[in-house]
Amino acid sequence: MASPTASVGGTTSRVLLLVSRRRTTACSGRRYAPPLMLSVRQQRSMRYSFSAEFLKVLPPDTTFGNAWESLCFELLAAEDGREGLQRLCAPDGGIDILRHPTRTAFQCKSDERGALGSLSTPESIKSLKAAAISRSTVRWGCYTYATNANYTGSAVKSILAEAEVLDLASDKIEFLGPEHWDALCSRYFDQIKDRFDFRGTVTEAQVVDAFRKARYFDNYVAKFEDVISKGNLTLKIKNNWTPVELEIPFAPDLTVENCVDAVQELLGVSLKWTNFADLGTSSGPSISLTVDRRGQTFKQTIGDVQAANPGRDLEFWITLVWKDETQSDGTAHDVVCRRMNLSFLTLARSAFSQSQRREHTLRRAEEMVQQMIWASARKLKNRE
């Protein structure tokens, strides 16, 4: 980042923005939150995206729906074994996968966007009706929707209302959304990793644009553009919250700080505090570049980091910070959620202990950060 210098007029305000955009401090390769911090979370769980940008359609599958069904089958087989697990062919009678020992019928529903509320309620009810008709021959006991997105509350009510009409007990209807498949992907990733492509290829122009968004001075941006074009270096950078891997053109003489700034913009990670008014808490990320979870100092050049760690992965490391109070410069969480199509239940601060408020706050914050990354990764994929 360019060092701020005294100036006049509009330039002065620009320098102030350059300074104030970072509310954390560079120290030993990490940006730490202010001293009032009560706790941090470095990583709880990896979150996957089951949208068409990342889930591959592999032969013999020909559609995204087939690919989602195949992924579900492989994860179920990894979890409980293949014995007694059967994939049904069309016409499937409203059942895609059947586990005979437990008499569990799975109906795999998906949407290419993988977004909340994107699944078709009428189609889901149609499958349930077909399964009810075939129950006399298939003899299933529990009917499970295996979905790459969550149903809305009204959709769940409609499905359960139809189950009642069909004389099916509501406790025999199960909904396994993306959280369930997230956990299985984390557990058995080596067995299903070939079904995904989480790489995001970045162009030189996109890296240069990232520096502009990071509010570098124009003369620095021009200098960076020149050295990148001559650098003949491509960095592969992972992160600790999603399996997204960026491939970005860079230059050995640019610093760790330059790399962190560019990746932050490319992944869409905001350093702003988010206020959770219902809990009376706030959260924000602290970022760094690590090798084997060791923070690299911001003034090191990327060339020096690679020379000291040959063949090691570079990782954009995000630590979530929380405070048991809201921030005057924080953004209301409902504003952020509307942008991301997220929704959280309204809670009451007085109903929870400090440790419980911490858990709720960090859980929300990690979902928001992961959504930021996935949204940016989709944009990168769609530009390829």
Image: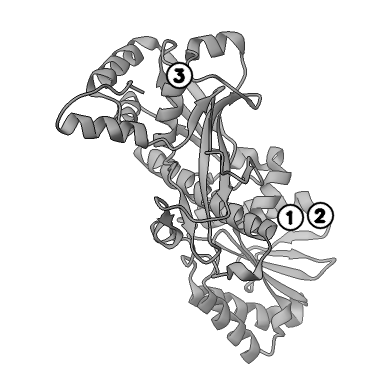
Residue that protrudes farthest toward the left in the picture: 9
Residue 80: assigned label: 2
- The answer to whether marks 1 and 2 mark residues whose Cβ atoms lie closer than 8 Å is yes
Marks 1 and 2, how far apart at CA: 6 Å
Mark 3 crowdedness (10 Å alpha carbons): few <14, some 14-19, many ≥20: some
Residue under pointer 1: 76
Q: What kind of element bears circle 2?
A: helix
Task: Measure the alpha-carbon separation of dots 3 and 2.
Answer: 41 Å
Q: Amino acid at mark 1?
A: Leu
Residue 343, image x and y in percent? 50, 64
Which one is nearer the viewer's eye here, 44 or 101? 44
Task: Give the residue drawn at x 41%, y 40%.
Answer: 381
Left-right relation of 170 to 21: right
Location of mark 3 (residue): 234
When the figure is inspected, residue 233 is found, relative to residue 287, above or below; the finding is above
Q: Amino acid at mark 3?
A: Thr
Residue 42: which quarter of the image? top right
Mark 3 vs mark 2: which is more N-terminal? 2
Q: Residue at x 60, y 9 (%)?
A: 308
The C terminus lies in quadrant:
top left
Within the image, what quadrant is residue 108 found in? bottom right
Q: Is residue 221 above or below residue 96?
A: above
In the structure shown, which secondary structural element does the residue marked by tag 1 occupy? Answer: helix
**Does residue 21 appear to the left or right of 185 in the view shown?**
left
Left or right placement of residue 192 versus residue 19 in this view: right
The local crowd at label 2, few if under 14, some if 14 to 19, many if 20 or more residues have their Cα within 10 Å, is few
Q: Nearer the viewer, residue 193 or 271?
A: 271
Query: In the image, residue 309 lies at what x, y percent?
Result: 61, 13
Name the spot of residue 258 as percent of width and height, x first: 41, 22
Q: Quadrant of the N terminus?
A: top left
